[in-house]
Amino acid sequence: MSAPLFTSRLSIPYSTKSSLNTLDIHSPTHTPLSPSYWLVYIHGGAFRDPLASSLTLIPSLTPLFQNPHLAGIASLNYRLSPYPNHPTDPSDPNDGARNAKWPDVIEDVRDAIRWLKKEEGLGAGEWFQEWIVCGHSVGGTMAVMVGMDGTGGGKEGKEWERGIWGKEGGMDGLKGIVSLEGIYDFTACRDAHPQLKEMYNAFMTGAFGPEEERGWERGDLLRCKRRIRDGVEVVVVGHSRDDELVEWEQGQKLIGVLDREREGKGEVVRLVEVEGTHSQIVRDGVAVGRCVDVAITVLVEKAKAKTKEPV
């Protein structure tokens, strides 16, 4: 019997805000090759599904740890928005873990990253561990948000600094962004699926507030006028043409925006076509490993090129 590729520690609290403010840490049983990177994973679930959690990454762990440059994985949980009509586990209005309002969710993600920086050494510099952020579905949306900074401003001005995407700062050492089946324009996603209009209206309003009050703009990554953080060297957007919930065009549009923004800045932006329905992408495990492999390959090549640069 072959030795296990990794060990796991589950349900570690990273804050005291609720019972869902926990994360799982998966560590390789081998010494990673240099350069090495941590992966921070954000699960999907429409911001509200109680059946989606950090454990959805488990099928991807073996493919991920096939990469010898992976130094560790943190899979995050976060507070959920209300879902009072869930068929098996409806939310209770008195449960602080399942009545989140924006930007609670993205601030939970940032809290978890700060905890990882303190406890696991994520960051920039000789004694710290560089890292990649990755997510699926709305977790992919938030992964891109983490990878963007607040210098763009936009029409909302200072509200962008906290009221929409959480407090700034603390993201040093971030080298790559990987988003699979992410939503980058929520209104367009709803309009592309008229048969699911009621479902989209419910979860988007629960997360961001009413559309008529411009609440959904809080999740709009295509027109927010923010930019990818300095130091990020690769962005990988994975998407499947078979996704029945998030249309192929979402990934294409984000790639178009990033290509224009990053032109001449040295970053690599790639659209990776994966296979499967929306949930199969994480259930099968292959796609997550493949897209992260693409990001790590780019980062390793860039790191090796830097060591060959003349002083």
Image (cartoon, rainbow, N blue to C red):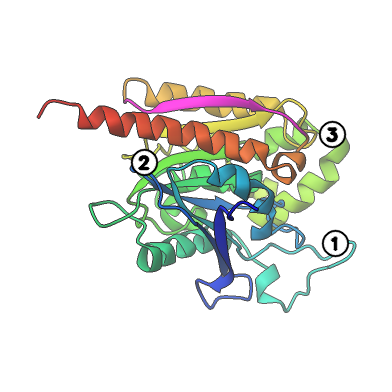
Of tags 2 and 3, which is closer to the observer? 2
**Nearer the observer, 122 or 188:** 122
Q: Quadrant of residue 123?
A: bottom left
Label 3 Cα crowd, 10 Å radius (few <14 / some 14-19 / many 20+)? few
**Residue furthest front as drawn:** 1
Please, what secondary structure does the residue beneath circle 2 have?
Answer: loop
| Nearer to the camera, 149 or 234 | 234
Residue 53 horizontal/vertical position (percent): 68, 59
Res. 205 in view: yes
The span picked out in magenta is 266-276
In the rendered structure, does residue 274 fall within the stretch colored magenta? yes
Residue that numbered label 3 is attached to = 194
Q: Which residue is mark 1?
A: 86
Q: Amino acid at mark 3?
A: Pro
Q: Is residue 266 above or below residue 132?
A: above
In the image, what residue occupies the spot 42% across and 33% down? 234
Q: In the image, is residue 137 part of the stretch drawn in magenta?
A: no
Task: Look at 66% across and 37% down and name the residue there.
Answer: 286
